Amino acid sequence: MTAWRELSRFTGDAVLVASKDLRIEWRARTALGQMLPFAVLVLVLFGFALDANRPTLRLATPGLLWMTVLFATVVAVQRSVAVESADGARRMLLLSGMAPAAAFAGKAAAVAVQLLVVEALLVPGVVLLYDADIESVPLVVATCVAATVGLAAAGSLLGAVVAGVRAHQTVLPILLLPVSAPVLIAATRAFADGFGTVAVDGWPWVALLAGFAAVNAVVGAVVYGPLLEDT
Amino acid sequence: MTPPESEGAASETLIASYLGGPARTGSRFTFWLGLATLIGLAGVAALGLLAAPADDVQGDAVRIIFVHVPAALGAYTALGVTAVGSVMWLWRRSVWWDVTAHAGAEIGVLLCGLTLVTGMLWGRPTWGTYWEWGDVRLVTALILFLVMVGYLSVRALGGDADSVATRAAVVGLVGGINIPIVNRSVNWWANRTLHQQSSLTDGKLADLTLFTLFLAFVMAAMAILWMMVHRFRIGWLERQLQARDLDEALAARRAEAAR
């Protein structure tokens, strides 16, 4: 019974933090007003960079899409960190008495929701702009969910590492992008199957994405407390 | 022969009295260790460049393994030390392990870079290309290198020593845990390797080549130990200096308040 109560309290706290972040984003319209145009812009620029060559674009679509998502992750995490830096909000989070792991889960969930919105725009975007065909909807959806949870967990954790540092906007990409390499590789391969551009089996890649998500979520939940206390 | 006195002996005594302990990073042990390492490395260079035979297939290019393989093993060892040190800082708040982790990261990045450069130089005549995307170890080593460069940039952010230690330790931990996933993903992605599996055990290497490689391993280990000890002592002194400054500032404020 206590375990159940603990769990429901954990979930309640996480939902509280996530809804707080999303409410701030919704009212400030930063996610909608900056991240979505940014993501579409990157898609268009890739089109210019590859000389609007349709066969090349079709072949490169999965990789380009996930590069765009990685960039959007950096932007989303920077926003998520900025929200916590203002007015000593991190201290308040620490003093609120909620489990640091729940706060971490909430922060990561808010980033994940925003990334899913971006992906919901990008996938139709590549169908329109790059002539991509979706062959397996379940595979595409599963890849998006698994990759997004992983990126949000790793991003929120590394975002907390650089929070409160003056140079945090330049350091975050250096930390996040190399660690995200497996997500880029795995999600690109899974999408190559989902879009039918390369004959591979996408589902083992989804499993690898889920593994990445699980590992980074657990590490984040464990070390978020010390990070909040020390920095 | 005794260890040579440093030029700034006067300022050294000043720092020593300020810290209440030795302010130098060298000692009799590291002096002799460093000297022996230098002589040994000269021996490796002589054996490797002149005495060891050229390979039937690879020609003189094979000689680069005397640098490449010890550097690669050294890099993984040093970065392993960083991963352990990161965990020990987060778990036990051990300053000793924190300073050790920092030392390991700096030396590991150096050796990892050396591994990548020598590997590329060797790859050009042997594989016909500087860079092979399909090679799992190569790509994994590059990602590891980039993660650890990020670790060092977090270390360089400055600020309170404990807070920097925690930030860096999380990066070290995240990097260390994700490296196997990176390796797995590159492995599935490329599904091939150009690295020969075990030139050491298949008996194809000449005796002199094997001996030179063995000597190179020992010398690399000694060089790494020498660098670790010095870098550790620098980090330790920096920590003490920071704590000392804080103590003095606190005392000054208290004196002001008492007045």
Image: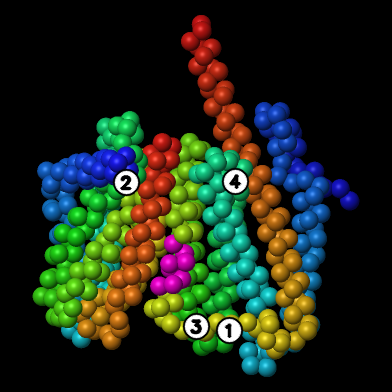
Residue A86 percent coordinates (x, y): 27, 36
Residue A56's quadrant in the figure? bottom left
> Magenta span covers which residues?
B178-185
Query: Where is mark 4, residue-wise?
Result: B97
Q: Secondary structure at mark 3?
A: loop
Query: Where is mark 1, residue-wise?
Result: B196
Mark 1–mark 4 Cα distance, whole angstroms, equals: 36 Å
Q: Are discs 1 and 3 located on one and the same chain?
A: yes
Q: In percent of the image, x 31 and y 59: which residue is there?
A: A151
Mark 2–mark 4 Cα distance, whole angstroms, equals: 26 Å
Q: Secondary structure at mark 2?
A: helix
The answer to whether residue A82 is visible is no
Mark 1–mark 2 Cα distance, whole angstroms, equals: 44 Å
The answer to whether residue B96 is visible is yes
Query: Where is mark 2, residue-wise?
Result: A104
Q: Is residue A64 left or right of residue A126?
A: right
- Number of marks in the rendered image: 4
Q: Is residue A188 left or right of residue B8?
A: left
| Chain at tag 2 | A
Query: Where is mark 3, residue-wise?
Result: B193
| Chain at tag 3 | B
- Asked whether residue B182 is drawn in magenta, I would say yes
